[in-house]
């Protein structure tokens, strides 16, 4: 499994780039947002990657950040969303905008992506609203996605299982993590978040 590439940008096309790593050219598919940020040919680039293997195809997908890769993994977990559609969505929305659209059920925002119709946009919102935690930034604001598998994401999930709404759970966990710091244990995070959510 190839998780990251560091090399020189050889060339770009509308949907992929070729990255030269020690004389080997890797063809990497990516969102237009990632491709536009790669720079000029010959420059050093670093891409987080995801390898997709099917019966008929094997492709490497590249991302400017780990959060974009997490968004891609979540999108492709939705029935009917393949790598092309996921990259089209990530071309239209950055990871924070995607998280906000899912949290707010903003189907129109997701449907702005090429190849995404209203039905698929609804399915994406419905299937990802419990998987994609969102940290609240201030009163009513939505911010960055909580990394999947992190203590913060697990704490948000725990509070939701106890009956708190996703936005309430995310706000309480964000406040608790702010007080305890990022290295806090899941147990400590859930306990403090519960106190804050119950206020």
Image (cartoon, rainbow, N blue to C red):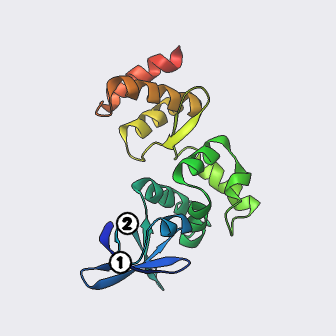
* Eye-nearest disc, 2 or 1: 1
In this view, 64 is above or below 16? above
Please tell me whether residue 46 is drawn above or below residue 175 in the rendered image: below
Q: Position of residue 4 (x, y in %)?
A: 32, 66
Vertical position of residue 47 compared to residue 192: above or below: below
Q: Position of residue 36 (x, y in %)?
A: 51, 68
| Residue that appears at 47% across and 60% down | 73
The one nearer the camera, 142 or 85, is 142
Would you say 94 lies left or right of 54 here?
right
Counting labels gives 2
* Front position in the image: 100 or 56: 100
| Residue shown at 45% from the left, 78% from the top | 17
Q: Secondary structure at mark 2?
A: strand
User: Which of the pair 114/125 is nearer the observer?
Assistant: 114
Q: Is residue 1 visible?
A: no
Quarter of the image holding residue 66?
bottom left
Identify the residue under disc 2. Answer: 47
- Please tell me how crowded label 2 is: few (under 14), some (14-19), or many (20+) other residues with Cα within 10 Å: many
Query: Could you tell which of marks 2 and 1 lies nearer the N-terminus?
Result: 1
Q: Tell me the quarter of the picture where residue 41 sits.
A: bottom left
Q: Which residue is mark 1?
A: 42
Most distant residue in the left direction: 22
Q: Residue 133, image x and y in percent?
A: 51, 41
Disc 1, SS: loop
């Amino acid at each position: 499994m190839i998780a990251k590439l560091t090399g020189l940008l050889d060339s770009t096309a509308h949907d992929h780039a070729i990255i030269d790593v020690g004389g080997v050219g890797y063809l990497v598919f990516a969102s237009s947002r990632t491709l536009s940020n790669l720079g000029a040919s010959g420059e050093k680039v670093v891409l987080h990657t995801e390898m997709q293997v099917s019966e008929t195809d094997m492709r490497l997908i590249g991302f400017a950040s780990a959060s974009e890769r997490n968004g891609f993994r979540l999108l492709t977990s939705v029935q009917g969303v393949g790598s092309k559609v996921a990259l089209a969505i990530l071309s239209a929305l950055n990871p924070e905008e995607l998280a906000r659209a899912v949290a707010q059920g903003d189907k129109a925002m997701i449907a702005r992506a090429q190849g995404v119709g209203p039905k698929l946009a609804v399915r994406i919102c419905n299937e990802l609203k419990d998987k994609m935690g969102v940290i609240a930034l201030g009163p009513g604001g939505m911010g960055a996605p909580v990394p999947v598998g992190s203590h913060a994401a697990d704490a948000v999930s725990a509070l939701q299982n106890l009956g708190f709404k996703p936005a309430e759970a995310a706000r309480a966990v964000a406040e608790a993590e702010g007080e305890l710091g990022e290295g806090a244990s899941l147990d400590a995070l859930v306990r403090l978040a519960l106190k804050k959510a119950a206020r």
